[in-house]
Amino acid sequence: MTAKSPLLNRRTILAAGVATLAMPAVLRADPAPVKLGLIHPVTGALAFSGSQCRLGGQMAIADVNAAGGIKSMGGAKLEALLGDAQLRPELAASLVDQMAEAGASGFTGCFSSSLGLAATQAAAKYNLPFSIDSGVADNLTTRGLTNTFRLFPSASPIVADAVTELDEVNKNAGSPVKSAVLVHENSEFGTNTATALKDKLPGIGIKVLELMPHATPTRDFTNIALRIKEQKPELVIISNYVNEYMLLIRTLVQQRVPLVAMFSVLGGGFGLKFAKEQPGISDYVMDFNQWYNPRKPASLAFRERVESAGGTFTWEILFGYYAVGLLADGFEHAGTSDKAKVIPALAASTYYPEMLPYGPTSFIGGQNKGGHAVGLQIQKGDIKTIWPSQFADAKPVFPRPKV
Amino acid sequence: MPPLDILAAALINGVLTGGVYALVALGLTLIYGVLHIVNFAHGSLLMLAMFGAWMLVSWVGLDPYAALVPLTAIMFVLGWALYAGVIGRISRGEDRAILLATLGIAIVLDNFALVVFTGDTRTIETPYSFEMIELGPLLLSVPRVVSFAVALVLAALLWAFMARTDTGRAIRAVAKEPDGARLVGIRPGRIFALSYGIGVACLGAAACLLLPSFYVSPQVGNVFVLVSFTIVVLGGMGSFPGAVLGGLIIGVTESLGGLFLGESLGPIGISLVFIAVLLLRPTGLFGAAR
């Protein structure tokens, strides 16, 4: 039997070993994570779009962390605080309060403009940076809130660009479109878009025959289709949400309304899912909307990444992704999560979303002036970019072939 | 005044839509008639049935109309099980508890659908999705005509079941006088479960009839449930003929309201008819004064 040393038994050796191994970690403790509030409607009528924005934000956080975190902050990791704003602006504002209390250093959100208006205003109370991921209302960035930034374009330039595209495509085809009916959902988004279009379309030689607003939800579009048929326009322009978009186009096809083209501006239902699930009606439908730059391999790889994981690729994912990317870039340049330094860093940011068809980034009053939507068309079950030519991967099929 | 062909089209379209509304409302009125409670889970169960129909079509490859038989049976079993396993046990005969139980089921089902199916909208395309029947200048969608016809046949079958079979008589006996029914050997608990099952089975049929011309999402129940409540009150709570006639009236009112007032203001027509009926005949068109 061996005698035990009172100073050096097995437990002492183990304890010493653990202490030695732990020492570097104590000396080089991980920097505190930077908390980001992701506020979206993930239940209720906008649940799908809100969830897509959230997914994009989470993908960006994962990518930033996998690449070593915020390097200028010693590799600080990003940490998501998730909030469901449903469709209630007061809840979106309350989530900002709760997350600010929990130590959030910035926010992204909220897909819907009405949620974004409430949430950005709430974040302004704390002067915490807010990166808008979707929501096109102009006044999100025209209220003088210095904490609010939008990398993506707002409604007015989108409508102006849409009219320019329509004019170019129509003239190239010999101007077959001379009149249009505008069908829109009757809340702020649809009404504002349709009103702006009504003012601009006569300037490109397209007479607006009628504005047809509808409620959300609308269960049946037969009356609208019949009234359009009676008016005999060459073009129908749609601004509404996902379910009504699909029902309207389906009814127009069923009622055999003879049209040169179906065009939408920020069409809620225009997407790959519509293209693939409804090939009989979706082919050659045109939309002016947000999309990726198809000429960048990174864009196609990103889409593949989403689809190979079983997801549905939509532009909301990209927006959620880059809204977080903008904030992370702000932290990187500020070298801190201190709002007093991050907000000026964001205001001076030249962060470039390489997968998007954008010009150089330049923020004026919180709005990036380099962001642009593009002309899209469903062709053979896929979405193609048809305008402007520097980002196009297909030519427009206009007029649409007769079925 | 719109041209006559558009007016006729709106009228026919309203009737076709009303037929499917009636089928959704039939289940609701049956459950109210027997259990004397408003089934708050009705919209959520319709949503679940529509996802069931979508799965049978997209995954199993069934035609939506062929899916009607198995889905109606599945929904019947689900309704029975929900009553026997949840609602009946929780309520212990208390009407308020039944209301809360159905509300709880609605919340669970809505969130279950969000988790499983996400908030995404789904549609199907069948070979006859865009088939139209030409009636002079009118174009009638084949899926909607079929849905209307099948809905009326199912409503008639349900009425015959209630009027001509012993089980139907037992259901009506329990609806009128549960204590008396118990005295003659009818077990009200089983009749309640059976009625709830039949009410939910109606939703299985309605789901298959709706799917070829509508979409399905976790929120789709809300699109139909309010209109169904309106139809049930309009027709007389617990009345089968009332539900069918109420469905047709609401369908036509909605369609003509949209035509004359625009689709934005059109839904107000439903509320106006509803208020008028309540003022002039508070028990509904076929409701008996209690």
Image (cartoon, coloured by chain):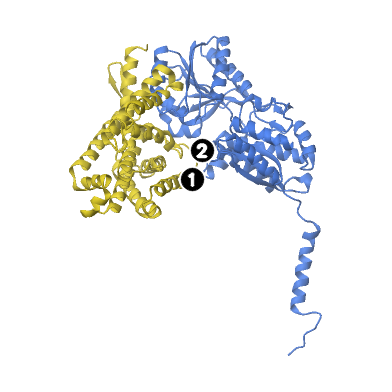
Chain colours: A blue, B yellow
Determine which residue is flagged by label 1.
Answer: B111
Type of amino acid under label 2:
Gly
Q: Name the residue located 28 percent from the left edge and 43 percent from the top edge.
A: B69
Q: In this view, does A30 lie to the left or right of A251?
A: right
Instruction: Please state which of residues A267 and A165 is positioned toward the viewer in this rendering.
Output: A267
Instruction: Please state which of residues B100 and A174 is positioned toward the viewer in this rendering.
Output: B100
The percent position of residue B111, horizontal first and vertical second, equals: 48, 45
The percent position of residue A350, horizontal first and vertical second, equals: 74, 31
Q: In this view, does B96 lie above or below A361?
A: below
Q: In this view, does A173 lie above or below A246?
A: above
Q: Regarding mark 1 in the picture, which secondary structure is present there? A: helix
Q: Name the residue located 41 percent from the left edge and 49 percent from the top edge.
A: B97
Disc 2 and disc 1: Cα gap in Å?
10 Å
Type of amino acid under label 1:
Asn
**Residue B143 in sight from this viewpoint:** no
Q: Regarding mark 2 in the picture, which secondary structure is present there? A: loop
Q: Which numbered disc covers residue A216?
A: none
Write down the chain letter for disc 1.
B
Q: Which residue lies furthest to the front in this view?
A: B290
The quarter of the displayed image where residue A363 is located: top right
**Does label 1 lie on the same chain as label 2?**
no
Q: In which quarter of the image is the C terminus of chain B?
A: top left
The quarter of the displayed image where residue A278 is located: top left
The quarter of the displayed image where residue A219 is located: top left
Q: In this view, does A7 lie to the left or right of A102?
A: right
Q: In which quarter of the image is the N terminus of chain B?
A: top left
The percent position of residue A120, horizontal first and vertical second, equals: 67, 33
Instruction: Please state which of residues B88 and B152 is positioned toward the viewer in this rendering.
Output: B88
Determine which residue is flagged by label 2.
Answer: A44
**Residue A193 in sight from this viewpoint:** yes
Q: Residues within 10 Å of mark 2 (few under 14, many from 20)?
A: some
Q: In this view, does B181 lie above or below A376?
A: below
